Amino acid sequence: MRTTRLVGLLLVAAGAVGCADGGSSPSQPSPGDGVTPSAAGGPAPFQARPVLAVQGRVLDGAGLEPGLVRRLETLDCLRKAPTANAPTAEAMLACDTRGAGFLLGPAGVDGGVQRAEVVEVRGGYAVQVGLDQASADALGDLVGGLVGSEGRFAVVVDGTVVDLPRAADGVGAVLQVGGGWTRAEADDVAARLT
């Protein structure tokens, strides 16, 4: 994915924002695991997950089960892409809008979206996602665990990877995803988040 598409994170201090198919483990996260569950009890439309592997490439040190890697390699994103997020504690197969397949780790953030606003950026449009404090903290924990590695995390909306920001040293309560999208693409993502 081009760097211009990976606008990544808009670093905003948390206090400055007034924000209105497959798994490897069926267990539920225990309190303090850094996962913010959705209010409805099931997976929320918005999740942030670490990227463990991309079709054709397992990231260094992933130590994945061979069965999961085989499932990733046979995933056909152009014919039958996953359309829902997996439960937070499970690994997840997902596709991006261009047809690339990903194996994602358990969700670091599940829900917590307080607002989603389309903004114009250089080269197109993006969506600024305002998170509640618990989700902003969980995102900080997820990103903090990836800093210094080649790790990326995936922003997943309804089973689709919409962005792959690089880990950064700090995050706030606003996450900017996209960039270079058309207005219609940004409107669609924002609508699915609210």
Image: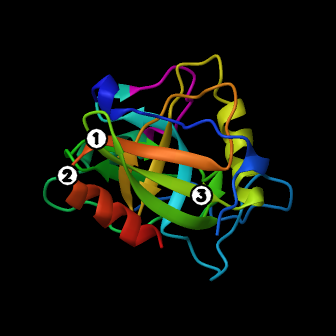
The residue beneath circle 3 is 130
Secondary structure of the residue carrying tag 3 is strand
Whole-percent x, y for residue 135 in the image = 70, 57
- Work out whether residue 25 or residue 36 is closer to the camera in this orientation and state it: 36
Whole-percent x, y for residue 72 in the image = 34, 44
Would you say 101 lies left or right of 165 here? left
Indicate which label's residue lies in the foreground, 2 or 3. Answer: 3
Q: Is residue 84 visible?
A: no
The residue beneath circle 2 is 76
Can you say whether 127 is above or below 58 in the image? Answer: below
Can you say whether 70 is above or below 127 in the image? Answer: above
Could you tell me how far apart the alpha carbons at marks 1 and 2 are, in whole angstroms?
8 Å
Q: Tell me the amino acid under the disc marked 2.
A: Asp
Quarter of the rendering containing residue 188: bottom left
Residue at 70 percent across and 64 percent down: it is 27
- Work out whether residue 157 or residue 179 is closer to the camera in this orientation and state it: 179
Q: Main secondary structure of the magenta part?
A: loop
Whole-percent x, y for residue 106 in the image = 60, 51
Q: Pointer 1: residues within 10 angstroms few (<14), some, or many (20+)?
A: some
Could you tell me how far apart the alpha carbons at marks 3 and 1 are, in whole angstroms?
34 Å
- Work out whether residue 39 or residue 66 is closer to the camera in this orientation and state it: 39
Q: Is residue 96 visible?
A: yes
Indicate which label's residue lies in the foreground, 1 or 2. Answer: 2
Q: Is residue 167 magenta?
A: no
- Judging from the image, the colouring scheme is rainbow
Q: Are marks 2 and 3 in contact (CB under 8 Å)?
A: no
The residue beneath circle 1 is 73
Could you tell me how far apart the alpha carbons at marks 2 and 3 are, in whole angstroms?
32 Å
Whole-percent x, y for residue 174 in the image = 60, 49
- Chain-order first, disc 2 or disc 3: 2
